[in-house]
Image (cartoon, rainbow, N blue to C red):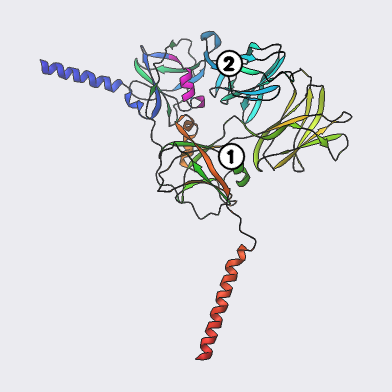
């Protein structure tokens, strides 16, 4: 009898193992248990922790049934009437301060729908504000206006998801009173909802921070669905990334090389390397000649461009000078490197009525045209945002068609560019081995790596930071360098001929 009971117990335990998705824990950095009481449609809300650990747009999110099979689902924002929303409360904010203004960065989980921003401002008197969000490496205006005093202020933003990971808040006060500051801010987000159909009751699993293509998207929107809260986030083990033998780096001549440093990376770790400005000056416009190498072999990588733009250069205190055309003034902006992939230029001027045609030149070629119009709202300065195309030389020129108006007394210029990040697996290095970034090979074709097939799912994978520790162009050979080898061969050949003649004459 005891033996029979033991056998029954073992069978029950085995059955539980068969319907438990525990094997799905392997291969994802984070998991959430979900007990579904009955078959049917289920809605699962996600919290801030999931949004910060997940790839943008849920590219790495999976839902597993009790048997371990992947379930189709849809990820969307809950309507305002069905959920109170998610709240992110933060004390202070990193700000760049000037005499009467400050530019602050508000951290934000990428790809989420921002409903409302409540910000506490330290400052006196009227305060002008502009709130911008990143869109395709440019800044897009969400809201602007003037607050008559500091304190708590609320902005209703809208219902469109914010692509990037930060908002830009510009604050402008009265000259001489000091720049206003952000004491705290609260972001109210729409709750992301995972919708799926459970075929049977049991313990399901939400998993993210892994690899692999997600299942098919659910298109149906059922009228009735069970609302279930997931369990606490559990740390899992993401799958190992491939670090097998890489293709040898052919004998291609590169003009520039940099050492890549990742002090905290171990072999097999995913590493992110953001390209610095100097790389664009050495590489081709399409970046197709970039290579990572170690020990004479290529390191496969996936190139990703975040939605947030990078500051490329500019000057907030320019004074437009005379142009070669009557009724026109101009300002010249120097960039840190040529070949930067510019996306946008911001022009600012004191708060006065303004309407002037603007032309941006790359060398002598027109890159963009616009008309700058401003109805002043002091202390908010006049601002124009002009989209820029392609790569630019080291210098660009802003022409202002003043007509019969005097030149602007001051002009602020901020230039923005695209960011590029290389994601790759840190390799096994031999003693004194070095990872290098190579650029400057005109005839080289763009690489095609299998790692790129993982695509956006890599963005939620745990990663380490890398940087270019030492940037240095390969020294150019002197003008006479190409003559050294032929001249040496000629001298040796002449000496051998002389020696042979001498031997023959003495014979």
Q: Is residue 218 visible?
A: no
Residue 495, percent from left and from top: 56, 79
Residue 232 in magenta? no
Residue 108, percent from left and from top: 55, 22
Is residue 180 shown above or below 330?
above
Which residue is tagged 2?
Answer: 184
Say which label, 1 or 2, has the lower sequence index. 2
**Left or right position of 254 against 228:** right
User: In the depicted view, which residue is nearer to us: 353 or 157?
Assistant: 353
Q: What element carries label 2?
A: strand
Residue appearing at x 63%, y 45% in the figure: 281
Is residue 309 shown above or below 104?
below
Q: Quadrant of the N terminus?
A: top left
Residue 142, percent from left and from top: 65, 20
**Left or right position of 320 against 443:** right
Residue appearing at x 69%, y 11% in the figure: 149
**Left or right position of 12 against 4:** right
**Residue 478 marker:** none
User: In the depicted view, which residue is nearer to us: 481 or 131?
Assistant: 481
User: In the depicted view, which residue is nearer to us: 126 or 159?
Assistant: 126
* Residue 376, picture quadrant: top right
Residue 474, percent from left and from top: 57, 52
Residue 47 in magenta? yes
* Residue 13, picture quadrant: top left
Which residue is tagged 1?
Answer: 276
Residue appearing at x 65%, y 27% in the figure: 139
Q: Residues within 10 Å of mark 1 (few under 14, many from 20)?
A: some
Q: Can residue 170 be seen in this view?
A: yes
Q: What element carries label 1?
A: loop
Give the residues in magenta. Answer: 42-57
The mark closer to the camera, 1 or 2, is 2
């Amino acid at each position: 009898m005891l033996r029979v009971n033991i056998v029954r117990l073992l069978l029950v335990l085995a059955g539980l193992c068969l319907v438990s998705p525990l094997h799905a824990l392997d291969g994802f950095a984070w998991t959430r248990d979900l007990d579904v009481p009955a078959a049917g449609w289920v809605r699962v809300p996600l919290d801030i922790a999931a949004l910060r650990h997940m790839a943008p747009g849920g590219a790495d999110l999976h839902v597993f049934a009790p048997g371990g099979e992947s379930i189709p689902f849809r990820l969307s924002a809950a309507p305002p009437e069905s959920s109170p929303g998610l709240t992110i409360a933060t004390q202070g904010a990193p700000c760049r301060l000037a005499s009467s203004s400050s530019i602050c960065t508000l951290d934000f989980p990428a790809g989420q729908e921002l409903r409302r921003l409540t910000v506490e401002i330290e400052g006196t008197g009227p305060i002008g504000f502009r709130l911008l969000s990143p869109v395709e490496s440019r800044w897009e205006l969400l809201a602007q206006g003037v607050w008559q005093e500091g304190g708590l202020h609320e902005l209703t933003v809208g219902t469109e998801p914010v692509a990037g990971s930060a908002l830009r808040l510009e604050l402008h006060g009265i000259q001489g009173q000091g720049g206003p500051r952000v004491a705290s801010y609260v972001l109210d987000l729409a709750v992301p909802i995972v919708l799926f159909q459970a075929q049977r009751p049991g313990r399901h699993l939400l998993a993210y921070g892994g690899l692999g293509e997600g299942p098919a998207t659910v298109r149906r929107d059922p009228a009735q669905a069970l609302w279930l809260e997931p369990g606490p986030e559990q740390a899992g083990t993401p799958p190992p990334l491939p670090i097998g033998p890489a293709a040898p780096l052919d004998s291609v001549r590169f003009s520039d090389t940099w050492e890549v440093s990742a002090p905290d990376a171990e072999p097999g770790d995913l590493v992110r390397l953001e390209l610095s400005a100097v790389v664009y000056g050495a590489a081709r416009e399409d970046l197709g000649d970039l290579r990572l190498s170690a020990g004479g072999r290529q390191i496969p990588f996936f190139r990703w461009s975040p939605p947030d733009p990078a500051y490329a250069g500019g000057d907030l205190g320019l004074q437009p000078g005379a142009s070669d055309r009557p009724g026109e003034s101009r300002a010249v902006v120097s960039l840190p490197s040529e070949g930067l992939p510019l996306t946008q230029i911001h022009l600012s001027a004191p708060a006065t009525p303004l309407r002037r045609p603007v032309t941006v030149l790359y060398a002598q070629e027109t890159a963009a045209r616009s008309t700058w119009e401003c109805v002043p709202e002091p202390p908010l300065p006049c601002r124009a945002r002009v989209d820029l195309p392609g790569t630019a030389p080291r210098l660009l020129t802003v022409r202002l068609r003043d007509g019969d108006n005097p030149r602007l007394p001051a002009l602020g210029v901020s230039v923005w560019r695209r960011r590029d990040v290389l994601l790759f697996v840190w390799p096994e290095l031999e003693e004194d081995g070095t990872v290098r970034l190579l650029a400057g090979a005109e005839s080289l074709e763009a690489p095609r790596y299998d790692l790129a097939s993982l695509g956006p799912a890599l963005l939620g994978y745990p990663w380490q930071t890398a940087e270019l520790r030492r940037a240095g162009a390969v020294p150019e050979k002197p003008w006479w360098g190409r003559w050294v080898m032929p001249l040496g061969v000629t001298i040796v050949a002449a000496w051998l001929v002389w020696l042979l003649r001498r031997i023959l004459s003495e014979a």
